[in-house]
Amino acid sequence: MIVELASNSERKGARALIEASGLAFEDQLDVMVGLYEGERLVATGSRAGNVLKMLAVAPDHQGGPALGELVTELVIGGQRAGYESLFVYTKPEYIVSFESLNFFLLARQEKAALLEYGKGLSRWLESKRGLVRSGLNGAVVVNCNPFTQGHLFLIENAARQLDNLYIFVVREDRSAFPFEVRYRLVEQGICHIPNAIVLDTSHYIVSGATFPTYFLKKDDPAARIQMELDVTLFAAKIAPFFGITQRFVGTEPNCPLTGAYNLTLRALLPLHGIELKIIERKQTADGAISASRVRELIAQGDFAALADYVPPTTLAYLESDAAKPVRERLRGSEDR
């Protein structure tokens, strides 16, 4: 019998099973379920958003139907919660087990693998078939929180070197500016570039914010693993569909995490026939333009200085009534 584990005592038992299986317990979850044999908990699993995690089965029930029953329950619950695609991160040795449960491998590296339930990626790519263009194609992947003169400088330089430039805007909504706003500002800011094509990343970016580490050892480099999965997913699954053979990034003098990501791109993209091209960041008198500096200026209410940092389309939005919630949020963050 599978039941939801909601009480402290039930979750304490699940935690004991998880940790006895060599996994770490993570508090970030929306639902936890357990499979009982009589009074004994023999398997447990959880879901956080659209990610299944902490799947653990007692040794004497491994190889049987327990894992499949747990996954089925969690997938159905996720679909009822409105998620069209469900994902699982696991050790590479469990890829076959999840493939037998109708998961498809998206990316793997030596310590981790990412799989998706169903055929969400293939459906998403097929929905973009009308955007496929022949010729020399490249890509940038941007968050644009918000769209700045630095983003525009990168895109204009990349577009001049290509027949077609695909601009992937990160859909994940963990930014000060909502996705719909970020996407629209990119569209408005690049409308004068005829060979630029804007689209979103859907679910297919591996985020450090949602990447679970319960199955990793304490000394495993979680950030590097997450980056390698993300780059591999883009290079192996997305780039070939669009005929992308070049990816462009700006230099990163300030953020160690972005700098490490650029190193990961440099190491892995050539393995998939993709060239990494690095463009020097656009500068102001105060240094390189960055979205973080733009957010600081918004929080300070210094709109006069913003004209040097953002295109007119972004500035018009920032000064509009529509941007009031964003301005207040950033000012509140500055106050704290």
Image (tube, rainbow, N blue to C red):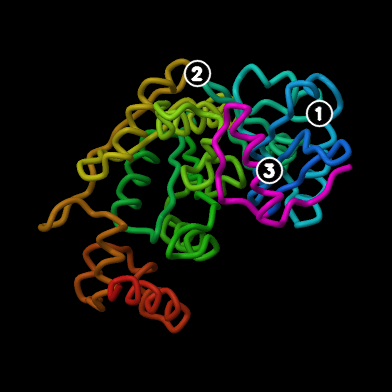
Q: Which residue is drawn at 34% across and 51% down?
A: 151
* Closer to viewer: mark 1 or mark 3: 3
Asked if residue 317 is positioned above or below residue 174 in the image, the reply reads below
The three-letter amino acid code for the residue at tag 1 is Leu
- Tell whether label 2 touches label 1 (CB within 8 Å): no
Tell me the distance, in whole angstroms, between the alpha carbons under discs 2 and 3. 45 Å
Please state which of residues 129 and 1 is positioned toward the viewer in this rendering: 1
Quarter occupied by the C terminus: bottom left
Q: Which is more N-terminal, label 2 or label 1?
A: 1
Q: Which is more N-terminal, label 3 or label 1?
A: 3
Residue 159 quadrant: top left
Answer few, some or many: residues within 10 Å of disc 1's Cα (few below 14, many 20 plus, some between 14 and 19): some
The three-letter amino acid code for the residue at tag 2 is His
Q: Does the magenta stretch include residue 248?
A: no
Q: Where is residue 272 in the image (x, y as percent from the top left)?
A: 50, 18
Tell me the distance, in whole angstroms, between the alpha carbons under discs 1 and 3. 26 Å
Q: Mark 3 points at which residue?
A: 13
Answer few, some or many: residues within 10 Å of disc 2's Cα (few below 14, many 20 plus, some between 14 and 19): some
